[in-house]
Amino acid sequence: MKYTKYLIDGKFINTEVLYSRNELINLLLLVLAKLPAAFMGVVFLSGLIPIAIIIDGMRNTKCRVIHFQRKGYKF
């Protein structure tokens, strides 16, 4: 309820005081904040690629087995 009271009273947190007057420092902080998140996203997506390849391979194998069974082959 404390934060709702701030919103109702119009007492918002001034985020401008967190920024430096030097634009280079602001850019450096921004890059340093985004790099770990971007790196973890690349690692996560790279981990999903082998899983997708395996699942698609299994699906393709199942499709081929059904195709060969319809043509009369027995396994």
Image (tube, helix red, strand yellow):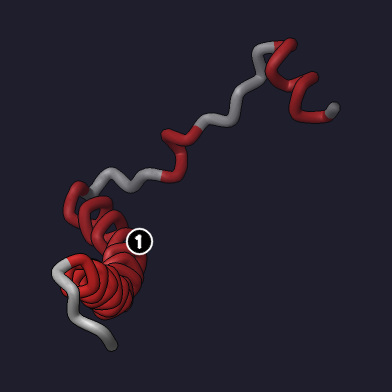
Residue 6's quadrant in the figure?
top right
- Judging depth in this view, the residue of 28 and 40 nearest the camera is 40
What's the residue at 35%, 61% (across, down)?
33
Residue 41 position within the rendered picture, expressed as x and y whole percent measured from the top left: 31, 65
How many numbered tags mark residues here?
1
**Residue 37 x %, y %:** 35, 64
Secondary structure beneath label 1 = helix
Tell me the residue at 73%/11% (across/down): 8
Specify whether 10 is left or right of 19: right
- Residue 6 sits above or below residue 49 on the image: above
Q: Quarter of the image for the C terminus: give it.
A: bottom left
Residue 54, above or below 26:
below
The location of residue 61, given as percent across then percent down, is 23, 77
* Most distant residue in the bottom direction: 75
Q: Is residue 13 left or right of residue 6?
A: left
Q: Position of residue 73 (x, y in %)?
A: 19, 80
Q: Amino acid type of disc 1?
A: Ala
Vertically, is 32 above or below 10?
A: below
The residue at the far front in this view is 72
Can you identify the residue that label 1 sits on?
A: 33
Q: Residue furthest right?
A: 1
Label 1 crowd (10 A; few <14 / some 14-19 / many >=20) = few
Question: Which corner quadrant of the image does residue 52 belong to?
Answer: bottom left
- Decide if residue 49 is in sight here: no
Point 25% across, 84% down: residue? 74
Side of 15 where 4 appears, left or right: right
Q: Quarter of the image for the N terminus: give it.
A: top right
